[in-house]
Amino acid sequence: MDRALFEMEYIKWIRSVAGKVGSRMACLSKPERDRLLSEYRRLEDPLEVFRELSSIDRVKGLHCGDTEKHIFLETDTINFFPSLGGRSNALDFSISMSRRMYYRGLWFSMISLNKSYAERATEKMLLFTLEHELEVARIFEDITRDSGSEVRTYDSERIGKLNITPEDLREDERLFLELIGTQPLLPRPYSEMALLLYLEENFSILRRFGTPSNTADEEAFGAGLYEEFIGWKGFTQNSYRIFVSEIRSKIRDAYAGYA
């Protein structure tokens, strides 16, 4: 698919998602609806999406993996993306995200968590989430270092030892659904772009977390990855503005004639 066709299809999809989000928000109380709309507008500035993780002491107190080399951030948002289950028009949601970003000759491992989830999840389920994201971080490290070579897989021994019970899962699902219904939903490409812009904006502080490429191939891969992100920056920001505009339009339509 060429870029022009992809952009057209993506905007069509984002408008469709925005329509569903707007319809759901139209059923909320006016104060809650206004609060969410204000959040969506605030997040049109991508530098408003992430900030330093306020519950970092809780995260590090869990003693999961090597947290010292990762940049931990928080967000008030929930990511969404097309469902990996293959169902047409279905969405998947995520309260956490792990990415390995390249900037100015250095690689950065960045993990974000939804602020409310990081504060309210049980210790066991937060540890489960963090172990998963640290595993993803290791996989991303292999991908970027091997530049497309076969990536080794990791067992889930540590995660299995957490002894997650059905009750744990039900409580976590209850919190997850509550957050989906009360916090802004962001397209994952916009969150990824915001993550890179956060790194650029705070590079002088975050530079100590960076690691150089091990090979010329890894360096070339990183430079290409950065250029690709920058090449999509304008479209990604514009598509999010369209997303917010469509949400507002759907809500206006729902209340047309009631003013």
Image (cartoon, helix red, strand yellow):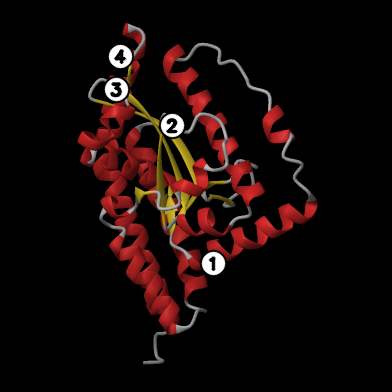
Which of the marked residues, 1 or 2, is nearer the chain's N terminus?
2
Q: Are marks 3 and 2 in contact (CB under 8 Å)?
A: no
Relative to 139, residue 46 above or below: below
Residue ID for mark 2: 68
Q: Dividing the image into 4 quarters, which one contains the N terminus?
A: top left
User: Which-is-in-front pick, marks 3 and 2?
Assistant: 2
Residue ID for mark 3: 106
Residue ID for mark 4: 220
Which of the marked residues, 4 or 2, is nearer the chain's N terminus?
2
Q: Residues within 10 Å of mark 1 (few under 14, many from 20)?
A: some
Q: Position of residue 95 (x, y in %)?
A: 52, 50
Q: Is 126 displayed left or right of 60 in the figure?
A: right
User: Which-is-in-front pick, marks 4 and 2?
Assistant: 2
Type of amino acid at the residue the image marks with label 3: Leu
Residue ID for mark 1: 181
Relative to 48, residue 9 above or below: above
Type of amino acid at the residue the image marks with label 2: Glu
Report if residue 8 is visible in the image.
no
User: Which-is-in-front pick, marks 3 and 1?
Assistant: 3
Q: Residues within 10 Å of mark 3 (few under 14, many from 20)?
A: some
Q: Nearer the viewer, residue 7 or 111?
A: 111
Q: Are marks 4 and 2 in contact (CB under 8 Å)?
A: no
